[in-house]
Image: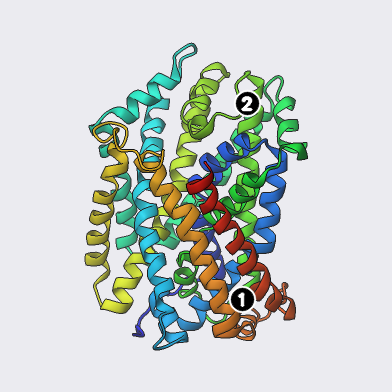
Amino acid sequence: MGNGNREQWASRFGFILAAAGSAVGLGNIWRFSYVAGDQGGAAFVLIYLIAIILIGYPLMVTEIAIGRKTQQSPIGAFKSLAPDTPWWLTGALGVLAAFVILSFYSVVAGWSLAYTFKAIGGFVPGLDYETIFVEHITDVFAPIFWHALFMILTLLVITAGVVKGIQRWAKILMPMLFVILIALVLRGLTLEGASAGVSFYLSPDFGEITGETFLTALGQAFFTLSLGMGVLITYGSYLPKRENVSDSAGWVIGMDTMVALLAGFAIFPAVFSLGFDPAGGVGLAFITLPAVFAEMPWGGFFGFLFFLLLSIAALTSAFSLLEVVVAWLIDEKGWDRIKASLLVGFIIFLLGLPPTLGYSLLSHVNILGMDILDTYDFISGNILLPLGGLLTSIFAGYVWKSKNVIAEANNPKGKIIFGEWYGYIIQYLLPLAIGAVLIWGIVDTFFLS
Ligand code: PHE
């Protein structure tokens, strides 16, 4: 159902910042630094970069093209390009993924908000930050409070709309994020002994690469670029026809990658310089870094900046997750934006309660060896997103046809020209690579470990 007064980004720049806001998130800072640390540093980073360029970029352009062509959110977009077929289910999978991702994302973002406030009180050397983190997440009420607060902040922006909400706040928050990140990189690199961290981060040890490295790198590429669930279809549907697609996607990828790489430069030198272990796992941001900040000159201030950075990054990603669901209700069901946002926001708040309580009241729940939050993360990141990406690439390559994507990507022509090469990538490389990694990941997780 077309919507006569559908909003549009004011400019290409507005779109790029909003889409980069979606891409840059907990994935670039919290998730990237701990998986890179776990997977041995530079070798992982290299494979991740290859996945971004060969798989992430073509898929991102494909999604934006689908949205821009149809001017619809994901379910409607597939319906309009392939009427009377079940392809709309790909869009529905995206809406489902948005619910699952945002409900645990908001919990981690809530921890980050809480730590921003903790940092104001300063981080004190010698404290046991592991215990402090465990105490925070095993509490019943505090994490619910921060999760609710994060959802309310997200709702304030989404109820204001695409231009007055998302675009406006992306223009304010993204530059802030870059300034903070650069301050943190300068701090990290100027600590005594920082070079050990830099070389961990820059000298690949290919002996460390295993099958899991590839799987993790691809999953990370999907997650960090917000691919495979319709965010870029939705944001692309607000992109004016006069703006080019191929270069815009290049900018989004460039910014996302730059933030991830810079986050590594902010984190690893500091971790090494102060003698901590880079393979700190999920707790790297919340346990290792506070301990690092406690030891460093001006640590309280830089700790505050770091968690503020993490919270801002999470917020602009949360906008896009909520917008996917809200846009569907507006486009397909004719709902009013405010009503749709409030209802969906409340449901996501409720869906976030099990992962929040997974460390306290529900800590006995264990699904295949994972707690509830990890289960949400696993199902969305390792299954729903790659599956969505796989279906989207098959759809674009074989149903809508690559020539139509090429036409949309080059309209109007940008510096990056889409040609026949794209057909090979979308028809063969993407389905094979994503399919193989998906099957491998499922087999590995459920049958081999
Ligand atoms: N890209 C976001 C991040 O890196 C997460 C995200 C995934 C957002 C999927 C939207 C959709 O944190």
Residue 67 is situated, as x and y percent measured from the top left of the image, at 48, 76
Residue 109 is situated, as x and y percent measured from the top left of the image, at 39, 42
Dot 1 crowding, Cα within 10 Å, few <14, some 14–19, many 20+: many
The amino acid type of the residue labelled 1 equals: Asn
Nearer to us in this view, 38 or 12: 38
Residue 376 is situated, as x and y percent measured from the top left of the image, at 38, 48
What is the number of the mark on residue 270? 2
Where is mark 1, residue-wise?
Answer: 244
Q: Is residue 441 above or below residue 74?
A: above
**Mark 1 residue CB less than 8 A from any atom of ligand 1:** no
Residue drawn at (47%, 41%) of the image: 310
Residue 103 is situated, as x and y percent measured from the top left of the image, at 34, 50
**Labels 2 & 1 near each other (Cβ < 8 A):** no
Q: Is residue 310 above or below residue 430?
A: above
Examine the rendering and report whether any part of residue 148 can be seen. Answer: no
Residue drawn at (51%, 18%) of the image: 294
